[in-house]
């Protein structure tokens, strides 16, 4: 399993924000730029168009929450997935989470759609994929999660599972569907 994990601590404001997202029903939703969680540093947030929040329960009652940020890479003419994942127990979010950098899952790097760079140059990074979702919808059950996001979730969940023994296999494993 490739990818470079970096584990970070979260503060109380970030923890409250994460716990609010974790209360959602299992599924996914596209987040506009302004709703990307504060766990993403401001300098990094400036490069993020939008993110997909993925919430999945486990048989043990633990929630795995992944925010898969869509990072704009103009030099590479690409959009890269940059996920952050965290475990949320019934007592609340854990005190830290994990960014997974440079993953190798299928769908991690995407070519932007036609017209993307014109809009980005004119208005800056932010909300293209929120207002123009690739699947035509901005939320849904885990079974409808696009392959790249499902694979990002699975890669993060596996790393969290290795590090945190309380997690049973996440339900989103079945979410790997064809685009």
Image: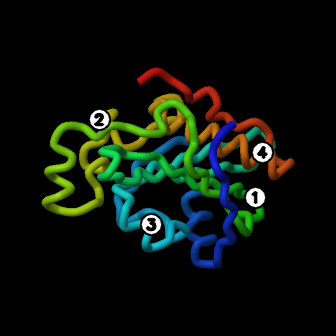
| Of pointers 2 and 3, the one earlier in the residue sequence | 3
Residue that badge 2 annotates: 136
State the image coordinates of residue 112 (x, y, percent, origin top left). 28, 40
Q: In this view, does 92 lie to the left or right of 71?
A: right
How many C-alpha atoms fall within 10 Å of the one at disc 4: few (<14), some, or many (≥20)? some
Q: Which mark is residue 161?
A: 4
The kind of secondary structure element at disc 2 is: loop
Of the two numbered discs 3 and 1 in the rendering, the one whose residue sits closer to the viewer? 3
Check disc 1 and report the residue beneath it. Answer: 90
* Location of mark 3 (residue): 44
Q: How crowded is mark 3: few (under 14 residues within 10 Å), some or many (20 or more)?
A: few
**How much space separates mark 2 and mark 4, taking CA atoms?**
32 Å
| Above/below status of 127 relative to 116 | below
**Residue drawn at 69 percent across, 62 percent down:** 7
Q: Nearer the viewer, residue 7 or 175?
A: 7
Which residue appears farthest toward the bottom when viewing the image? 12
- Element on which disc 3 rests: helix
């Amino acid at each position: 399993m490739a990818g470079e994990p970096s584990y970070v601590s979260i503060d109380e404001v970030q923890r409250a924000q994460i716990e609010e997202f974790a209360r959602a029903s299992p599924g996914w939703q596209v987040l506009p730029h302004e709703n990307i969680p504060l766990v993403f540093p401001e300098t990094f947030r400036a490069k993020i168009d939008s993110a997909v929040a993925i919430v999945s329960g486990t048989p043990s009652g633990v929630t795995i929450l992944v925010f898969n940020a869509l990072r704009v890479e103009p030099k590479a003419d690409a959009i890269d997935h940059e996920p952050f994942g965290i475990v949320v127990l019934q007592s609340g979010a854990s005190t830290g989470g994990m960014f997974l950098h440079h993953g190798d899952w299928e769908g991690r790097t995407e070519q932007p759609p036609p017209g993307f760079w014109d809009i980005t140059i004119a208005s800056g990074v932010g909300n293209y994929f929120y207002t123009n979702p690739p699947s035509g919808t901005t939320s849904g059950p885990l079974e409808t999660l696009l392959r790249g996001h499902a694979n990002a979730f699975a890669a993060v969940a596996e790393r969290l599972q290795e590090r945190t023994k309380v997690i049973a296999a996440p339900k989103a494993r079945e979410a790997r569907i064809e685009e």
